[in-house]
Amino acid sequence: MMRLLPLGLFILLLTGCVGDRSDLELFVTTTKAQHVAHIPKLKETPKFEHFVYQADLIRSPFVPPSRELTAEIIDTTKDCLQPDLERRKGRLETYPLDNLMMRGTLSETDIIWALVETNDGSVYRLGIGEYLGLYNGRIAKVTQQMVEIIELIPDGSGCWTERLSNMELTGE
């Protein structure tokens, strides 16, 4: 008998859910009749312009770009941060940082060197104080996971500003 009481109560509650829904149906019908959806017209398709690709005028998209070099205009008359003009540029200073990848590290006692690969497949061992990148990037710190690089970025007025960049270990 105790089991039938909850079942009977449940059936009684369900019968209360069935009722007159005419006001709800009237509301839905009038709302649908009054509301008109505004769909904006599609824009005209742009006119197709044919492009003749001439490989002698433009770099081929199937060949990697050549190494980039920056033209440095340095005003030595100003008393502000300047790159060292007397320093001989290294081989890795002809590559932008996004063309270099950290591939690993080598260590001896407490000295850690970073293994850096260029986009042409060459691998170099670099330590703290060595230079790389187009903007006089000097390695400030080498860890097992990344290399911190301090670059000198021209500010347009003849002076240079330091910028911190990181090169993280990639295992592709």
Image (tube, rainbow, N blue to C red):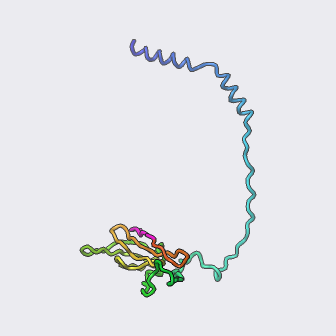
Left or right of residue 165, residue 26 in this image: right
Q: Nearer the viewer, residue 2 or 101?
A: 101
Determine the residue positioned at 73% across, 48% down. Answer: 40
Determine the residue positioned at 73% across, 53% down. Answer: 42
Residue 28 shows up from this direction: yes
Residue span colored magenta: 163-172
Rendered-image quadrant of the C terminus: bottom left
Residue 170 shows up from this direction: no
Asked which quadrant contains residue 50, the reply is bottom right
Q: Nearer the viewer, residue 149 or 120?
A: 149
Q: Position of residue 45 (x, y in %)?
A: 74, 59
Query: Does the magenta-highlighted stretch encompass residue 100?
Result: no
Q: Position of residue 79 (x, y in %)?
A: 48, 80
Query: Does the magenta-highlighted stretch encompass residue 164?
Result: yes
Rendered-image quadrant of the N terminus: top left
Relative to 151, does residue 39 appear above or below in the rendering? above
Relative to 86, does residue 104 appear above or below in the rendering? above
Q: Position of residue 80 (x, y in %)?
A: 47, 78
Q: Position of residue 168 (x, y in %)?
A: 40, 68
